Image (cartoon, rainbow, N blue to C red):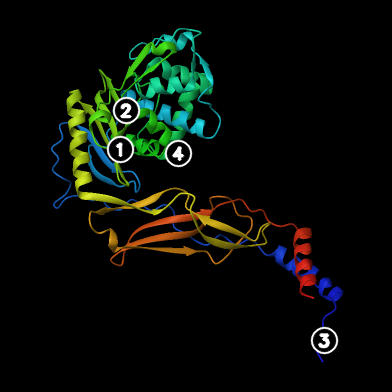
Amino acid sequence: MRYRTPRFIAAAGLGLTIALALALPAPVLAESPGNPELVQPVVSEGGQPALDLASPSAVLMEVLSGQVLYEKDATKPLAPASLTKIMTLLLAIEAVEDGRLGLTDKLVASENAESYGGTEIWLEPGEEMSIEEILLSVAVASANDSSVALAEHMAGSEREFVDLMNERAVELGLTGTHFVNCHGLDAEGHLTTARDVAILSSEASRHPDLLRYTSIYEIRIRPGGETWLVNRNRMVNFYQGCDGLKTGWTNEAGYSVSITAKRGGTRYVAVVMGAVASTDRFADCVKMLNWAFANYTSLLVAEKGHLYGAVPVDLGRCREIEAVAAGDHGVLLPKGVEGEVSREVSLSHRVKAPVRRGDPVGVITVSRGGEEIGRYDLVSDRDVGRISYAGLWWRLLARVLGSG
């Protein structure tokens, strides 16, 4: 004869179980490596490729992996000129994407914005323009007055906006960058490096709406199309795959440019600063990009938002979370070896609440020929709070009663 434990007796034992469960300290989430350090730069035999650049400072970077293929005096602080506007545009596009700024919103130009001179669209004090037209005038025509008007609209003043620029620079790891203004006119202490511009440009190139503006060669704005904007980045008109980003020039900075181009699934950023002639900056970027596209390709190994498996959560308000990639990640490879690459997904066996969205819960390891060439975190897709005593009691009670 088989005996059953009466349900009221089983339920009475829940108190001790719950007390023990809640008394246990929440363990540290399973260890997972942080973002991988960049692997050693891929270069031709004997060192960096012999590109023979005329410009004094340059960087070539692959966007998906963040890998530097070539650099020349890339950490020297230099005046950025209008490369500054890449950060201005990035902050604006991020605000559009999260709903803080609307493309159809109207901006009212101030007397301060009208006073800057240089490259401009001749804003009149009190003139209203849509945010989209302002973005176009900055991205295509590099308008200083529009940059200031945008900064004032977003942050209340240019000074407050510049604080946001410097905060974002810190977040991106731009260790050689300090902004003093939002437009790039020469100012004491307004400096960056070619490497920092490449990192900033790589981040900007992850925003398709920003590239939609910077890829435009010419466009008309204002009622009746009275203002004709022409892009000073002529590579968007002749270089295959080029869709941005920004040119710059001042007396102090010389000629600079940040070019991004994509062919297939591979995107590069080429940055030149301090060139003596405008033609030098474009010629040097063409040399770098041609060499990169001819010799290397990138392989996507982790896709932003993709679900890579479920991880159980102990003592959580929900029982499991999904492991996702926080961003697109990839590796850079010599052409023709893509088939030699393998990928392994490793997830934590379980985690204990509380869990925050973005907490590491696994890792993707990428190998070629048995050698690890990349490692990327997988993170929780949501916040999970710790279940209350009452919630756990009812969960266990339901389980017991459901089994009878």
298 to the left or right of 223: left
* Residue highlighted by disc 3: 3
| Nearest to N terminus: mark 3 or mark 2 | 3
Pointer 1 local density, CA inside 10 Å: few below 14, some 14–19, many at least 20: many
Secondary structure of the residue carrying tag 4 is helix
Tell me what residue is drawn at x 43 percent, y 23 percent: 135
Circle 1 sits in a helix, a strand or a loop, which is it? helix
Q: Label 2: which residue? A: 246
Which structural element holds mark 3? Answer: loop
Residue 241 in the image, given as x and y percentages of width and height: 28, 37
Residue 132 rendering spot, x and y as whole percentages: 46, 23
Give the CA distance from mark 2 to mark 1.
15 Å
Question: Which residue type does callout 2 highlight?
Answer: Lys
Q: Is residue 112 left or right of residue 62?
A: right
Per the model, the C-alpha gap separating discs 4 and 2 is 21 Å
Residue corresponding to mark 4: 171
Residue situated in front as seen by the camera: 61 or 27: 61
Quarter assignment of residue 281: top left
Q: Position of residue 343 (x, y in %)?
A: 38, 62
Alpha carbon distance from label 4 to label 1: 15 Å
Within 10 angstroms of label 3, few (less than 14), some, or many (20 or more) residues?
Answer: few
Judged from the image, the secondary structure of the residue bearing numbered disc 2 is strand
Disc 1 designates what residue?
A: 195
Residue type highlighted by circle 3: Tyr
